[in-house]
Amino acid sequence: MAVEQRDEAFRQLVEPHERAVRLHCYRMLGSLQDAEDLTQETLLRAWRSLDRFEGRASTRAWLHRIATNACLDEIDRRGRRILPVMLGTPRVAFTPGPPVPADTPWLDPVPDTWFDLADNEPGPEARYEAKESIQLAFVAALQQLPGRQRAVLLLCDVLGWSAPEVAEMLDMSVTATHSALQRARTSIGRRLDSRSARLSPAAERVLVEAYVRAWERGDVDALVTLLKEDARLSMPPLPEWYVGIPAIADFFRWATGADGPGPYRIVQRRANGSPAFEIYAREQPFVLQVAEMDETGITTITSFMKPELFAYFA
């Protein structure tokens, strides 16, 4: 086969699965840049092994096997991604301290556009619905699992392969796969934040519009009425995180006051299945904020002080 024909055949083979592979890499690694890099690494490894791919497994399974093993190699090198809520106990008064070291591996939010049309063929073993599997709390909980447990849980419970199929993909015994899956399910069940319930699109839209208006007007009283009593606020790379209306209200008073970086302009986005906001301060990118909500109000606000994230949401 001519090189051009081989290139085109490879492109047609892998292109329908590339977005799903990228999202899988994000779930495994919790990093947008790493997910993009490992997707390219997956395609490179697939290209190099194309002559050995005989179609005995589906293209989807073949690519996810390569991607998972590439991600496991990356986890061995870099460790896990974190959020402030994974560090120590919360504070009930707003007293921010210095950022942690610049090389701290913080978890990234993922734009919902990465999710569109990806993972559209989960198998019968899948236990998590599509939206659940990209929620920020779920991805954060995944990062606390050992790499192989993380992989087995995702391949079985999110993507829907059976334990024997996953055992073959990861060169594990079926017994070891079942054991890793059970430990992962137990561990993630303890860690997963179940506070956010589903919100109808109409109710979410009302809450989001009220939140944006309050931010742009600097209306602390209006902002506070939108919060649950046990709402959480974190602002990576600051390691502190806060629980309760008094602490979050103090933050809003500072942010919207004379000493804060405003005035603000808000651009609505979506990340990890939740409302998200690009917040510009004096027309400069400031924070990428993800707000998790339920029918009673805002449960969690995570403000990623990483303006380079804006490029992924544009």
Image (spheres, rainbow, N blue to C red):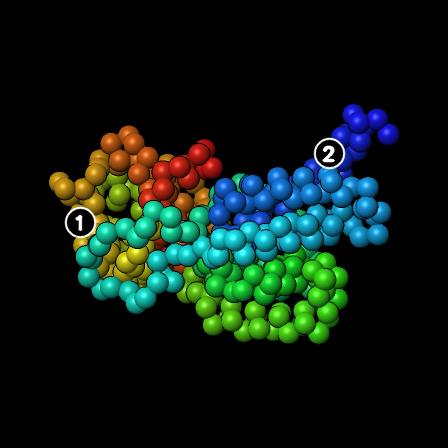
Residue drawn at x 23%, y 52% is 98
Looking at the picture, does residue 255 appear above or below residue 184? above
In the rendered image, residue 205, in percent from the top left (x then y), is placed at: 41, 46
Q: Is residue 119 visible?
A: no
In the rendered structure, which amino acid carries the disc numbered 1?
Arg
- Where disc 2 sits, the SS reads helix
Mark linked to residue 253: 1
Of the image marks 2 and 1, the number of the one nearer the N terminus: 2
In the rendered structure, which amino acid carries the disc numbered 2?
Arg
Looking at the picture, does residue 303 appear above or below residue 8? below
Looking at the picture, does residue 187 appear above or below residue 249? below
In the rendered image, residue 239, in percent from the top left (x then y), is placed at: 30, 56
In the rendered image, residue 5, in percent from the top left (x then y), is placed at: 81, 27
- Where disc 1 sits, the SS reads helix
- In the image, farthest residue toward the right: 1
Q: Quadrant of the rendered structure where residue 298 is? A: bottom left
Q: Foreground residue, 219 or 189?
A: 189
- In the image, farthest residue toward the left: 258
Q: Give the quadrant of the C terminus.
A: top left
Mark 2, residue position: 11
**Foreground: disc 2 or disc 1:** 2
